[in-house]
Image (cartoon, rainbow, N blue to C red):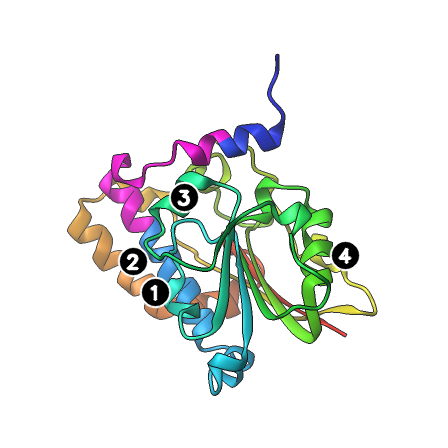
Amino acid sequence: MNKSKSDKVKDFYENWDVSKYPDYLKVLMEFEENLIFKIISKDDFFKSLSKSPKNIKVLDCGCGFGSFYDLTKDFDTIYLDFSLNLLRKFKIEKNKICASIENLPFKDGIFDLILCINVLEHVDFKKAVFEVKRVLKTNGRAYFIVVNSDSIINDEIFVEWKIPHNLISKSDFNDIESEDFKIDYIKSFYFLHPFFKVFPKPILKGIINLFFKNDEKISSFLKFKGQFLICRMVKK
């Protein structure tokens, strides 16, 4: 019996063990995570919420094993993932829920902020986005980060990864925009060519440091051609 896409995705993450990946891949994953952390933490809306974090309700939707815990630890945050394996690896005791983004177990209008990082590629895009919209408060924001189908650089570790992927473009977000769910901003980031993976780890880290420092400049020049997109949407 052929497995469904969702079953394949779940099987992949139920057997996920990052310690078994080669060093270069761990370095690239860390680079992406650091870029995401920098982009969100410097975002004006995020900084405005950080002034009184205990009063802000946050959902980390697809939290995995807690890669972005430092972004959300000071808020009133719920951490949700559909993989028990990943949640077990996430070393906090409370506020963890095992559930799917396509059927969120919350009432309407609960959250001020939702993070959805590298999730939409693996699920029903529209269904997941509309569920996020449903549980956001009015004037709440969602940050969606996805692998960009319009990237000028195709790196197999992000577009294949031995897991079903539906790459997503700026136009996909434009298509789901509505009067009550608007794009606040959208940009691409991460422009590291896969060729650099051949270098030894110390050299690769030096190259990555240069790209990290100059990602905004490269993004301004190349517009929506980076390997990832970040889209912030607001519920009206």
Region of the chain picked out in magenta, as a range:
11-28
Say if mark 2 contacts mark 3, CB within 8 Å: no
Left or right: where 184 falls relative to 226: right
Give the alpha-carbon distance from disc 3 to disc 1, as whole Å.
27 Å
- What residue lies at 44% left-to-right and 36% top-to-bottom? 13
Q: Nearer the viewer, mark 3 or mark 1?
A: 3
Q: Could you tell me if residue 85 is visible in this image?
A: yes
The residue under label 4 is which amino acid type? Ile
Give the alpha-carbon distance from disc 1 to disc 2, as whole Å.
6 Å
The residue under label 3 is which amino acid type? Leu
In the rendering, which numbered label is found on residue 212? Answer: 1
- Mark 4 lies on residue: 176
- Mark 2 lies on residue: 208
Give the alpha-carbon distance from disc 3 to disc 4, as whole Å.
29 Å
33 relative to 2, above or below = below
Say if mark 2 contacts mark 4, CB within 8 Å: no
Left or right: where 169 falls relative to 158: right
Say if mark 4 contacts mark 1, CB within 8 Å: no
- Mark 3 lies on residue: 86
Left or right: where 175 falls relative to 38: right
Say if mark 1 contacts mark 2, CB within 8 Å: yes
Closest to the observer, 57 or 205: 57
